[in-house]
Amino acid sequence: MQCTIMTNGEYAAISRYRSVVDSSEMIICADGGANYAYQMNIVPDCIIGDLDSIHPHVLEHYTRLKVPVMKYPRHKDFTDTQLALSAAEEKGAGNIILLGSLGGRLDHTLSNLYSCLDMALKGHQIIHYHPDYQVYMVNSCLTLKGTAGDVVSVLALTDIAKGVTEIGFEYPLQDAVLESRNPFAVSNVMSGPTAVIRVQEGILAVFHYPQLPGR
C-alpha cells in the first residue's frame, strides 16, 4: 500500500504534487502538512503531531469532516514526521512518499532523511519527493528512469555502505564501499534512460535531479 505523508516543510506550486497524492491509497498529515492538504482539497486519513503548526480554520474544517486527529504533547521525544512514519507503518504502508520533507531548513531536511533509516532497513520503500528532484532511500536495489544527462548523487546514510554498484552512469561503480565521512559519489551523470544502483549492506540516499525544460 502506498502512503503519502505531507509534512510541514517547503513546497513548490501545490498543484505539482497532485499526481502523487492521487496515486496514494492513504494520506497522513504531519501537523502543519494539513494546511497543504487543505489547499489541495484533500481529506487525509489522519492528522498527527503536537498541532502547533496547523491553522485553526484548517483544524476546524477537518474536525468537522471527522478526520482522526492524533494530538501529542509539544514536549516530546519524536518529531511530527517520525510520528507520521510510525502511523504509516502501523497502518500497513509498504511504500511511503514524503512531501515537503526537503528544502528549507537544513536541520529539518537531515532529520527527515535520518528519520527514515529504520524503516528503510526493514525494507520499506521510501521516497522524499519534490517536483524538481527526488531522494530515494535504498537498502538493496533501485532502478532509475530518466534521460541521459540527469545528475545523480549517492550518499551513505549509515556509517558504511558496502557492495555499492552503479550501472548506466558516466562514472560506474562496482562493489564499492561508501563511507558517510567520505562522500565522493556525488554528481554522477546518467548515460541513458535507465540506471541501476545496488547496495549489499547499509542504506543509501540517492538524489535524482531530472533534466527539466528550460534548465
Image: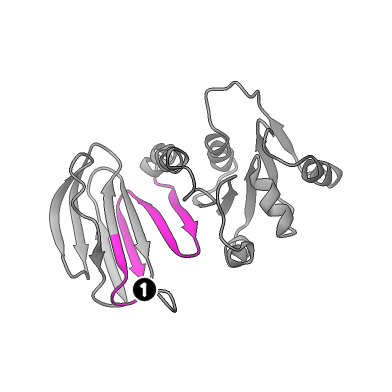
Marker count (numbered): 1
**Magenta stretch in the rendered image:** 123-152
Q: Residues within 10 Å of mark 1 (few under 14, many from 20)?
A: some
Quadrant where the image shows the C terminus: bottom left
Residue 13 position in % (x across, y down): 60, 63
Q: Residue at x 68, y 33 (%)?
A: 52
Q: Amino acid at mark 1?
A: Gly
What kind of element bears circle 1?
Answer: loop
Q: Residue at x 66, y 42 (%)?
A: 32
Q: Residue at x 36, y 71 (%)?
A: 145
Q: Which residue is mark 1?
A: 146
- The image quarter in which residue 70 lies: top right
Residue 149 position in % (x across, y down): 28, 74
Residue 24 position in % (x across, y down): 60, 59
Task: Give the image's coloring scheme.
Answer: one colour
The answer to whether any part of residue 42 appears in the image is no
Where is 5 relative to 187, above or below? above
Does 180 sit left or right of 48 as displayed?
A: left
